[in-house]
Image (cartoon, rainbow, N blue to C red):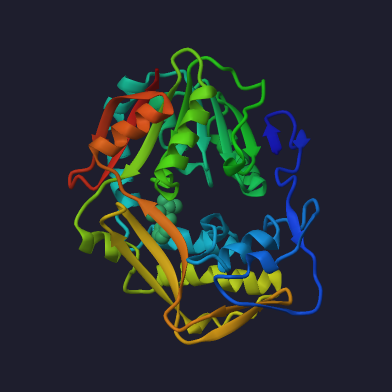
Amino acid sequence: MLQLDQTESAIDIANPGIGSFELEREAPHRVQAGRATDALRLRNRQAVTESWNGREELLEGLNAPQAWIPSKYFYDSLGSQLFDAITHLPEYYPTRAEAAIFSRQIGDIARAVGTGRILIDLGAGNCEKAAGLFPALKPAHYVAVDISATYLETALARLRHRFPDIGMTGLGLDMSEGLSLPDSVPDARRLFFYPGSSIGNFTPADAARFLSGLRRQCQQQGGLLIGVDLIKDKAILDAAYDDALGVTAAFNRNLLARINRELGGTFDIAAFAHRAYYNEAEGRVEMHLVSRNAQHVLIDGYEVAFEKGESIHTENSYKYDDASLSALAEAGGFAIEQRWSDSKGYFADLLMVAE
Ligand code: AVI
């Protein structure tokens, strides 16, 4: 964890990727998709790469009966810029819908949330979403959490000039490893801020676990202000994840480009098609990369085979309704206090209070 505060630029660095593994390399290894896991010999090693939790996680995923790549790997520097471009697309409504909620209903939100809270921004990025709330919420302290500590440092340096009266702490950590706040963060009146419907990228069970983890970090009057994308017409959802310009396709394919760049992969990017659709039975948008023909790929000397039409599942984006939101809140130990939505009812922000 890299922690930054107002007085020191970096006060604690610990490696969150402890216990990662690396494949033991021998001669190039032929691995058939779907039945390779037992062919992989693993050797415990710390901190294999800075950005991948060991190649075995990737290779096991690619060789599972339904091949998959963990979606956390979307966000390298190029992937983050592509995601930023997605938020400007006409088809991708969530960012604009949430911005409309915050700009039109901020008075109401501030009345419900109250001022002077410890605002903990989860996945803060450039911190601009939270900063937009500062004038209304007047937080006593702002804690920005993001996987990229360098990005946070720059963003917080800018914010400190604009809001010199608000104490600020930056935490560079991967929240999927669990969130543990340092003692310097006051524990009363914590308000977690998790906008942008990122909760939708967790399975419902993992989302409930994530909320329970936040609940454990809340004491008196703890709460969560969270953004969720709502179930809607399939055509609208399909278009939001398969835009006409092909930006989401580039975002998806960048996963393969990233494997090529960082792990010496040999993916032919053009040989995989972007596929995204709303799976109504599962209540989620799924993104896949579909192999256009039978092919094999080398990753660090290991070969992975794909049949024509075989897909790599790269992301789930769950959509919620009132029933699933109540179930999520309850499973996480929260109660829904208030809910705000945009004029089309596409997106909602909720204030959940610790029970
Ligand atoms: C970050 N997350 C909320 C986005 C979503 O809508 O699930 C990621 C995304 N994937 C494709 N487009 C946007």
Residue 143 seen anywhere in this rendered image of the structure: yes
Quarter of the figure that contains the N terminus: top right
Q: Residue at x 63, y 46 (%)?
A: 154
The percent coordinates of residue 228 (x first, y second) are 34, 42
Quarter of the figure that contains the C terminus: top left
In the figure, is residue 345 to the left or right of 296? left
Q: Residue at x 62, y 80 (%)?
A: 297
Q: Residue at x 51, y 41 (%)?
A: 127
Q: Residue at x 59, y 36 (%)?
A: 178
The percent coordinates of residue 65 (x first, y second) are 50, 67
The percent coordinates of residue 253 (x first, y second) are 50, 72
On the image, which quarter does residue 181 sit in?
top right
On the image, which quarter does residue 236 sit in?
bottom left
Compared with 38, 110 (above or below) is above
Nearer-the-camera pick, 108 or 65: 65
Nearer-the-camera pick, 163 or 96: 96
